[in-house]
Image (cartoon, rainbow, N blue to C red):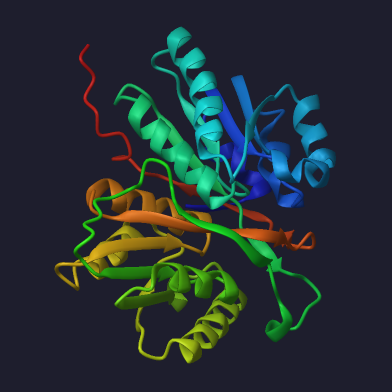
């Protein structure tokens, strides 16, 4: 469901036990908390802080600190540290409130950290825990630059599988790499180089399921650029608005080639990234992979004025014993 930020409070409950967000140098990391802070009560407030980018984030982080958030330090280059820090906080909360309700602002998490958090929540919560996800899209990426010049990241530090999504990899089998293309050609190309897959499938956002026409046009342009480099790749379309539809899109591609190790890399928005996690939950042979960038564009985006309330009623599969 899409709502304007100034009306968001009217679509949510008046109280959640836990609110989790991610601090970022992007102004939109503050969009949701600023819209609901005085209207909705939270017993626990957690905000993730990417240690390698601490100096860039400190201004926006100070806003979270003034609002009473507990900092959870994360590091894309140290997944175990990220897991340990989140587990410590989640266990502390769930020991005190086993039936805690959660509201998660997924907007400005790095994809790797978001996927780790989703795995931990999936493993920790039961059907007695309520959970909602919020996402506020950017109005524009790399504002001020022409389409052909827009960039979000540069260089690659490493390519790795994501903790909790190792899949089932058989050394004797060839690889099928599925990329949910966003706006980063170099980053996608690095994944292909790293895995040397026998089959490549590159997806772009379905026009009717894109955040906006502008986002669709930029996504399609970057997809076309990548396809020039890897002309033998197959293609598909996916939803950037509906998690369940995007999950089905991914699973359909994963089933296309029997006898392959399937690697999926989310490179579009956070709604489709969540869908990648759900697809891996449904098909445990899927491995999720991320290319960690060396440099982010500090002028990454301008915030939009709306929010998507992402409902996933089947997110928690475990049945409570009580």
* Viewer-side residue, 169 vs 93: 169
Q: Position of residue 244 (x, y in %)?
A: 32, 55
Which quadrant holds residue 64? top right
In the image: residue 315, left or right of residue 145? left
At x 35%, y 89%, the residue is: 232
Q: Residue furthest top?
A: 96
In the image: residue 244, left or right of residue 87? left
Q: Position of residue 250 (x, y in %)?
A: 31, 64
Q: Position of residue 101 (x, y in %)?
A: 45, 24
Inspect this view and state whether residue 279 appears: yes
At x 82%, y 39%, the residue is: 58
Up/down of 63 relative to 56, above or below: above
In the image: residue 281, left or right of residue 267? left
* Viewer-side residue, 35 vs 253: 253
At x 40%, y 44%, the residue is: 311
Inspect this view and state whether residue 16 appears: no
Which quadrant holds residue 213? bottom right
Up/down of 322 relative to 291, above or below: above
């Amino acid at each position: 469901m899409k709502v304007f930020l100034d009306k968001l409070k009217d679509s949510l409950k008046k109280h959640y036990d836990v609110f989790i967000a991610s601090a970022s140098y992007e102004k939109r990391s503050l969009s949701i908390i600023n819209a609901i802070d005085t209207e909705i009560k939270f017993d626990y407030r957690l905000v993730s802080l990417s240690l390698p980018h601490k100096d860039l984030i400190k201004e926006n982080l100070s806003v979270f600190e003034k609002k009473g958030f507990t900092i959870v330090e994360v590091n894309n280059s140290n997944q175990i540290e990220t897991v340990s820090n989140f587990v410590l906080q989640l266990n502390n909360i769930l020991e005190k409130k086993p039936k805690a309700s959660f509201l998660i602002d997924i907007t400005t998490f790095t994809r790797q950290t978001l996927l780790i958090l989703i795995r931990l929540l999936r493993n920790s919560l039961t059907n007695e825990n309520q959970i909602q996800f919020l996402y506020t899209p950017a109005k524009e990426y790399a504002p001020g630059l022409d389409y052909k010049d827009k960039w979000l990241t540069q260089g690659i530090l490493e390519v790795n599988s994501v903790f909790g999504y190792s899949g089932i990899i058989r050394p004797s089998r060839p690889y099928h790499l599925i990329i949910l293309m966003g706006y980063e050609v170099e980053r996608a190309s690095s994944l292909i180089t790293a895995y040397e897959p026998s089959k490549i499938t590159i997806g772009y956002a379905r026009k009717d399921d894109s955040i906006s026409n502008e986002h669709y046009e930029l996504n399609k342009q970057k997809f076309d650029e990548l396809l020039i480099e890897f002309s033998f790749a197959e293609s598909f379309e996916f939803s950037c608005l509906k998690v369940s539809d995007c999950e089905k899109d991914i699973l359909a591609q994963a089933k296309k080639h029997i006898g392959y190790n399937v690697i999926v890399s989310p490179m579009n928005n956070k709604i489709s990234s969540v869908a990648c996690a759900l697809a891996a939950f449904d098909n445990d042979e899927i491995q999720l992979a991320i290319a960690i960038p060396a440099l982010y564009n500090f002028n990454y985006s301008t915030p939009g004025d709306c929010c998507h309330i992402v409902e996933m009623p089947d997110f928690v599969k475990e049945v409570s014993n009580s």
